Structures are given as structure tokens and as C-alpha cells.
Amino acid sequence: MECPDCSKVNWVVVREKVEIQTRFVDLGTGSPGRKKYTKNWRKEETKKERIIGVRCNSCDLILTDKHLEGREVGIKEIHATKGVLLENQAMNKFLE
């Protein structure tokens, strides 16, 4: 499937994953000036990821339903580990 903007076939799935990290800092008595960190960054927690969508890796176009109108194939599901499930649009119109 070609990109509607750049006609390339370089697609990637984009996800957002939030990671909370902490680092110690000694504020002392609260006097003015730069306070240095005392230890390295530590991972505290990773929040649940969220799939944003399919993006063209060449021109950064996020693929939407509007871009897929009139095409034979559409995206039915994007799963983080299983992959992208494509469906035949013509078959859906026939079944309606």
C-alpha cells in the first residue's frame, strides 16, 4: 500500500509508552544556587502503552480512515504484539 502523500511503502506502527524516572537531589538548606544530583536516574514505573496508529516513515503522515476511503484494503485492528490486521473493504460493503 502506497502512501497518499509521498507514494512510498515505508510504514511503521507508532506507540506511546510513558516511563516514570526519579533522581535524588540534595536541596540542603534551600539557599539559592544550582543543586547537583547525588545519584543516577532510576526507573520507577512504566505506564501502559498506547498505540497511536500507522505512520509513513518517509513523510511522517499518520494514516487515518480518510486516507483509506475508496481503497480495497483497510485497517481493522492494530495490535502491539500480533501486528496489523488488514481487511477487504469491498467485502464489507457487500455484507452490509
Image (cartoon, rainbow, N blue to C red):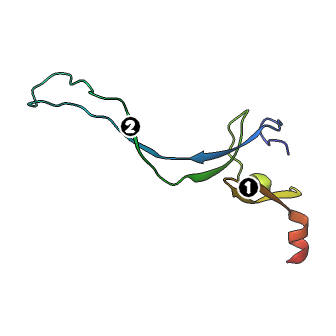
Residue 35 in the image: state x and y as whole percent.
21, 25
Q: Residue at x 86, y 55 (%)?
A: 71
Query: Relative to 39, is 73 on the left or the right?
Result: right
Residue 65 in the image: state x and y as whole percent.
73, 57
Local secondary structure at mark 1: loop
Q: CA distance from mark 2 to mark 1?
A: 30 Å
Residue 49 in the image: state x and y as whole percent.
55, 52
> Could you tell which of marks 2 and 1 lies nearer the N-terminus?
2
Local crowd size for mark 1, using a 10 Å CA cut-off: few (<14), some (14–19), many (≥20): few
Q: Quick one: 13 or 28, which is closer to the camera? A: 28
Residue 18 seen in the current view: yes
Local crowd size for mark 2, using a 10 Å CA cut-off: few (<14), some (14–19), many (≥20): few
Residue 70 seen in the current view: no
Q: Quick one: 70 or 20, which is closer to the camera? A: 20
Disc 1 marks a residue whose amino acid type is Lys
Q: Residue at x 87, y 71 (%)?
A: 93
Query: Relative to 27, is 24 on the left or the right?
Result: right
Q: Quick one: 31 or 7, which is closer to the camera? A: 31
Q: Is residue 20 above or below residue 92?
A: above
Residue 13 in the image: state x and y as whole percent.
69, 46
Q: Is residue 26 above or below residue 16?
A: above
Q: Which mark is residue 42?
A: 2
Q: Residue at x 90, y 69 (%)?
A: 91
Q: Which residue is mark 1?
A: 82
Query: Relative to 35, is 66 on the left or the right?
Result: right
